[in-house]
Image (cartoon, rainbow, N blue to C red):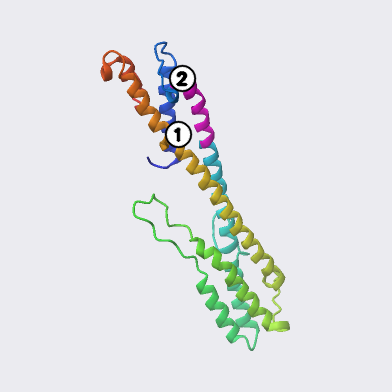
Amino acid sequence: MAGSQRTFEAILNRFREGYNLISTWLDYSPNKTLIKKATLGVFIPSVEAANTLATNTEVALGNMRTSRHRLVFKVTEPTPNPLCAEARIGRIATYIEGDLDDGAQATKKVKSILKKMQPRYDKKAEGAPRGAGQSPSEKSFASAVGHLQEVIDIVTVLGVAYTPADVNLKVPALTTLMTDIKNANKAVTEAADAYGKANRARKKLYTGPDGISTQTVAVKGYLTSFDGGKKSDHYIEYNQAIKGT
C-alpha cells in the first residue's frame, strides 16, 4: 500500500462507500463480529481520526523542520535569514580577517568550521518519492551545535580584540542561538516521534490483522455465500464500490 495521505484517504473513501452500500441491505447479517454493520460503523470514524492525527503531526513536523532550518542554514524563501548560524559565522570570519591584525589563524579556523557546516544531504533511497533526499540530514543539524560552540570558543580566546559592531555576532547572542538550535533539534526529534507513532497506528488500521484490507476480504468472503457467489448482485455491487468504479 502506498503511503501518501491522498492514498490513505482514497482507500478509506472507497471502504466507506462499501459500508454505506451494505448498510442498506436487510439481508446482510454475517456471524463474524469484525464485519457486522455495527462494528464497521464504529471502525470507520476511528480510521478518520487516525488519518487526521497522522496528517496533523506530519504538518507539525514539517513546520518545525522548516523553522530549525532557518536557524542553521541560509535560505532565500520565503524571506532571507541573515541571522542564521551559517550567515553569522561567515560574517564573523570576514570581520576577524578584516579588523584584527593578528586574526589570520582565527580566520582560518572559522572558515574551516564554516566549510564543515555546509548542509549534508542523505542519498535518496531507491524507490523513494520525488523530493526525498532534498532536506539536510539530521547529522547536519546535530553538528551545527558543535560548530557554533567552536566559533564561540575561538572568539572568546580573542578577548577584548573581538568587538564586532553587530551585537548578533557577539558571544551572548551566539550562545542564545546555540541554545535555540539545541531546543529546535529536540523539538524536531519529539515531533518526528509523534508522527512516527501516529503513522504506524494509522497503517495498522489499514493493513493490520483487523484493518481495512482484512475486513474487505472478509466481507467479500461473506458475500460469496449469497446465491450466485461472486456473480451475485451483492458481491458485484460491493466489489465495484470498494474499487471506486
Residue 80 is at least partly visible in this image: no
Dot placed on the residue nearer the N-terminal end, 2 or 1? 1
Mark 2: few/some/many CA within 10 Å (<14, 14-19, 20+): some
Check residue 45 for magenta coloring. yes
Q: Secondary structure at mark 1?
A: helix
- Residue 23 vs 110, above or below: the answer is above
Mark 1: few/some/many CA within 10 Å (<14, 14-19, 20+): some
Q: Residue at x 54, y 37 (%)?
A: 52
Q: Residue at x 52, y 25 (%)?
A: 42
**Are the residues at dot 2 and dot 1 in contact (C-beta closer than 8 Å)?**
no
Q: Which residues are magenta?
A: 36-50
Direction from residue 11 to residue 199 in the image, left or right:
right
Q: Residue at x 58, y 86 (%)?
A: 105
Quadrant housing residue 230: top left
The label shown at residue 171 is none
Q: Residue furthest top?
A: 26
Quickly name the residue at label 1: 9
Quadrant housing residue 245: top left
The label shown at residue 37 is 2
Residue 150 in picture, x, y percent from top left: 60, 75
Quarter of the image where the N terminus is located? top left
* Mark-to-mark CA distance, 2 and 1: 21 Å
169 and 214: which is toward the camera: 214
Q: Residue furthest right?
A: 160
Tell me the amino acid under the disc marked 1: Glu
Residue 159 in picture, x, y percent from top left: 71, 82
Tell me the amino acid under the disc marked 2: Lys
Residue 23 in picture, x, y percent from top left: 44, 16
Mark 2, mark 1: which one is toward the viewer? 2
- Residue 165 vs 194, above or below: the answer is below
Q: Secondary structure at mark 2?
A: helix
Residue 220 in picture, x, y percent from top left: 34, 23
